[in-house]
Image (spheres, rainbow, N blue to C red):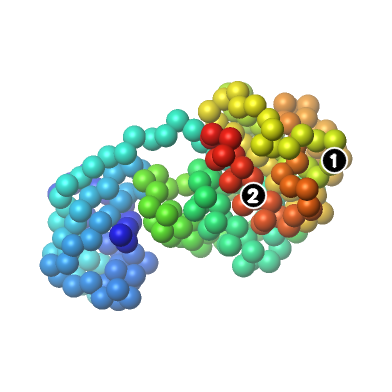
Amino acid sequence: MILFFSKDLNNSDALLEEDEFHHCCKVLRHKTGDQIVVTDGKGSRAEATITSISKRAAQLSLGNLSYTPAKETHITLAVSPPKNRARWEWLIEKAVELGADTIIPLKTQRSERQKINLERSRKIMRSAALQSLRAYHPQLEETLPFSSLLEETRPDTDKYLAHYLSTNSNLTALDIKNRQAIILIGPEGDFTEEEVLAAQAKGYITCNISTHRLRTETAAIAVVDQLKVLGY
């Protein structure tokens, strides 16, 4: 099944626009009368019939609307983006496919990349969510300084910081206390000692995620998978 995105499924009709329209009608060559499946990324899904096609949009008639309740667990991945844009885009695509719910670009003392194209990144994440048939599409937040993130983390959240030290416990050996988790991934140069101590002072648990030293994007993928195994 191919799933398409439409902003509003609250009425009897809807629109396919922009990238979704191009993919459906230009790439896959769907025509008037064809049936497709659409989601709003907020739990709703509907069968739809294409009723008309213009130069920039396709009009849909909706039927068999269904709703998936939101899950109780939530994974927030706060990561210092790699300098290479392709690695960042690969990171967010795979993190979404594996189950990340919120991604926060993290600005640390050793961050190599200061700016993110949020619009492009959100399109990549939406495409990954559709590819993996997710009822709820993940959120990409604005870039956040490390110190600000520490102050904003909710108290009912399990807080982890991935840090390569042999004395740290492995992430998969830790106990779940809450239904929400946030994990911090540093840049290629890792977090500074000052940042690690500041995070620990705010209740973050430093943990290992591998017996090997990983690149930022590999670490991000590994932690999402491990958190899903833990039950988040």
Disc 2 designates what residue?
Answer: 222
Q: Amino acid at mark 2?
A: Ala
* Chain-order first, disc 1 or disc 2: 1
Q: Is residue 131 left or right of residue 156?
A: left
Q: Nearer the viewer, residue 154 or 147?
A: 154
Q: Nearer the viewer, residue 53 or 45?
A: 45
Q: Secondary structure at mark 1?
A: loop
Judge whether 125 appears above or below 76 on screen.
Answer: below
Q: Residues within 10 Å of mark 1 (few under 14, many from 20)?
A: few
Q: Is residue 14 left or right of residue 224?
A: left
Residue 123 visible in rendering: yes
Judge whether 148 appears above or below 39 on screen.
Answer: above
Residue 126 visible in rendering: no
Q: Residue at x 80, y 39 (%)?
A: 195
Q: Residue at x 38, y 52 (%)?
A: 133
Q: Residue at x 68, y 66 (%)?
A: 84
Q: Residues within 10 Å of mark 2 (few under 14, many from 20)?
A: some
Q: Which label is found at residue 151?
A: none
Quarter holding residue 132? bottom left
* Residue 223 locus on image (x, y percent): 64, 45
Q: Which label is found at residue 166?
A: 1
Q: Nearer the viewer, residue 231 or 82?
A: 231
Judge whether 25 appears above or below 12 on screen.
Answer: below
